[in-house]
Amino acid sequence: MPDQSRFHVRLDNFEGPFDLLLSLIAKHRLDVTEVALSQVTDEFIAHIRAAGPDWDLGQATEFLVVAATLLDLKTARLLPTADVEDEEDLALLEARDLLFARLLQYRAYKLAAAHLGELERVTALRYPRSVSLEPHFAALLPDVLLGVGPDRFARIAAEVLRPRPAPVIAVEHLHAPRVSVAEHAAILRGRLARSGAATFRSLTADCQHTLEVVARFLALLDLYRDHEVAFDQVSALGELHVRWTGPAN
């Protein structure tokens, strides 16, 4: 007796399960152009309505995917297989082959899903052992022999449990020493007030690194803004002379 939950197709040239119809089309035993897809769709809608509120959403989704593929395949099959006249016809022929390949792929996935479902069903019948070994089997297990004595084990434990020093991450290479422009401005102010004039080279001769040279240059700009110094430079990129114009000490 046929399974009432499965969808059966009744056409002029075929009668049987929908899966069998797909199998015949995939094996080239039934031409998809001879299948009345509109009639198949009407019968499936009637099948869904007959199921009432208990209709299968997965079955309906599966039918929509397959029916859309068959419709595309049938449309492409209607293209004559004679000489290809232009690139558009060639593209349709390629699309027809791709649609047929998609149908075969669908069948492969469905068979794989059925196989995995059967494996799950068989595995569900197995139960893991939840008891200990029988005494005569437990006696066969070899004794666990450790090559570490109590004294050595105590030393290992003490070494493992000894508090570790907190890790120190050096940041000297990430951050250069801070340089105060105000401090270098005070140094320049004192030197220039005493000497009256000096070159920029002499004012930075005691700098230890580039940041101090930059800080003193910025300090000179601050002094120039406050009208405490003036600059003289005979030629472009030449020696820079700095004159003190502020109040005398």
Image (spheres, helix red, strand yellow):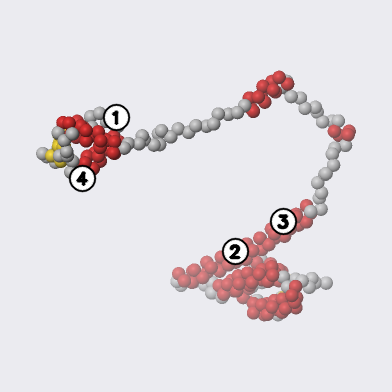
Q: Secondary structure at mark 1?
A: loop
How dense is the environment of label 3, judged by Cα within 10 Å: few (below 14), some, or many (20 and up)?
Answer: few
The residue under label 2 is which amino acid type?
Ala
Task: State which mark lies toward you, 1 or 3.
Answer: 1
- Front tag of 1 and 2: 1
The CA span between labels 2 and 3 is 23 Å
Residue 175: x and y in percent read 39, 37
Q: Which residue in the protein does label 3 denote?
A: 116
- The image shows residue 136 at horizontal and vertical percentages of 89, 33
Instruction: Name the kind of residue labelled 3 in the image.
Output: Leu
The answer to whether the residues at label 1 and label 2 have Cβ atoms under 8 Å apart is: no
The image quadrant that residue 210 belongs to is: top left
Please state if 222 lies on the left or on the right of 116 as rendered: left
**Disc 3 element:** helix
Left or right: residue 20 compared with residue 244 = right
Q: Type of residue at label 4?
A: Arg
Alpha carbon separation for disc pair 2 and 4: 81 Å
**Residue under label 4:** 225
C-alpha separation, residue under disc 4 versus residue under disc 3:
84 Å
Q: Which residue is mark 2?
A: 101
Q: CA distance from mark 1 to mark 3?
A: 76 Å
Quote the CA–CA distance across marks 4 and 1: 26 Å
Looking at the image, the residue that sits furthest to the front is: 249
Q: What residue is drawn where x is 74% and y is 75%? A: 53
Residue closer to the observer: 74 or 66: 66
Give above or below for 66 relative to 137: below
First along the sequence among labels 2 and 3? 2
Q: Which is more toward the observer, 217 or 234? A: 217
Q: Residue furthest left?
A: 234
Q: Are marks 4 and 1 in contact (CB under 8 Å)?
A: no
Q: Which residue is mark 1?
A: 208
**Structural distance between the alpha carbons of marks 1 and 2:** 77 Å
